């Protein structure tokens, strides 16, 4: 009986999107926010926190569903903080936040849905303007958040269906002893 749940975070789509977001944010802030060191630092740290808490949460899930859920929710909160920063950037500069009625949104959304590799995004960054990059980041944040929410709900259901590590360790020990 295996009572340790292991997820390779590098294979999780929402992690891949968070990794892309970190690099996009690093590039974006260093290109467009050179005069605003505080916002640059906060955006990079929010992107990093989103990515790092996915790693830490999925690794902690080996022994603690509670810790995993807490850290994955911290990842979500960090990504939503980053979302607000990108939206603020666009709003104060009177640039568009592309909703589903914007003429370029469907193509951007499709691209972000079908591309999860860092190289797919880094090759585009030098050709894109700030409005395009910010909207790409916003789209990726929504997709990563959606994936995180689904994963968290799945983990919650797994806990309800199969129990936690303590329960499963005790069960395995009883089975080993023949009780």
Image (cartoon, grey):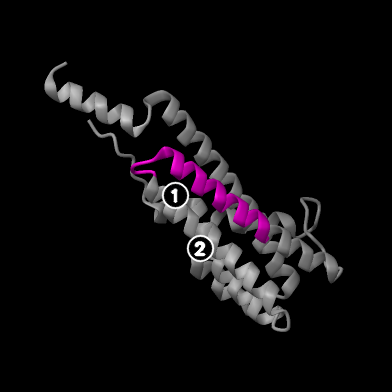
- Which quadrant would the N terminus be assigned to in this image? top left
SS state under label 1: helix
Q: Local crowd at mark 1 within 10 Å, few (<14), some, or many (≥20)?
A: many
- Which quadrant would the C terminus be assigned to in this image? top left
**Span highlighted in magenta in the image:** 61-82
Main secondary structure type of the part rendered in magenta: helix
What label does residue 19 carry, if any?
A: 2
Which residue bears the numbered disc 1? 57
| Point 44% across, 49% down: residue | 57
| Point 67% across, 57% down: residue | 81
Name the quadrant containing residue 34.
bottom right
Q: Is residue 6 left or right of residue 22?
A: left
Name the quadrant containing residue 86.
bottom right
- Cα separation, mark 2 vs mark 1, equals 15 Å
SS state under label 2: helix
Q: Is residue 68 located in the magenta-colored stretch of the structure?
A: yes
Of residues 3 and 98, the one drawn nearer to the viewer in this rendering: 3
What label does residue 147 carry, if any?
A: none
């Amino acid at each position: 009986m295996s009572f340790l749940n292991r997820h390779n975070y590098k294979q999780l789509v929402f992690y891949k999107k968070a990794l892309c977001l970190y690099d996009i944010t690093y590039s974006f802030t260093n290109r467009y926010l050179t005069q605003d060191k505080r916002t640059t630092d906060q955006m990079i740290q929010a992107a990093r926190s989103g990515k790092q808490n996915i790693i830490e949460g999925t690794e902690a899930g080996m022994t603690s569903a509670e810790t995993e859920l807490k850290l994955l929710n911290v990842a979500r909160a960090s990504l939503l903080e980053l979302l607000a920063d990108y939206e603020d950037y666009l709003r104060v500069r009177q640039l568009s936040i592309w909703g589903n009625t914007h003429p370029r949104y469907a193509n951007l959304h499709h691209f972000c849905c079908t591309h999860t590799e860092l190289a797919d995004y880094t090759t585009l960054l030098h050709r894109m303007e700030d409005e395009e990059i910010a909207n790409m980041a916003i789209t990726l944040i929504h997709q990563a958040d959606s994936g995180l929410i689904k994963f968290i709900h799945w983990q919650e259901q797994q806990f309800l269906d199969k129990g936690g590590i303590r329960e499963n360790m005790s069960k395995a020990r009883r089975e080993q002893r023949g009780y």
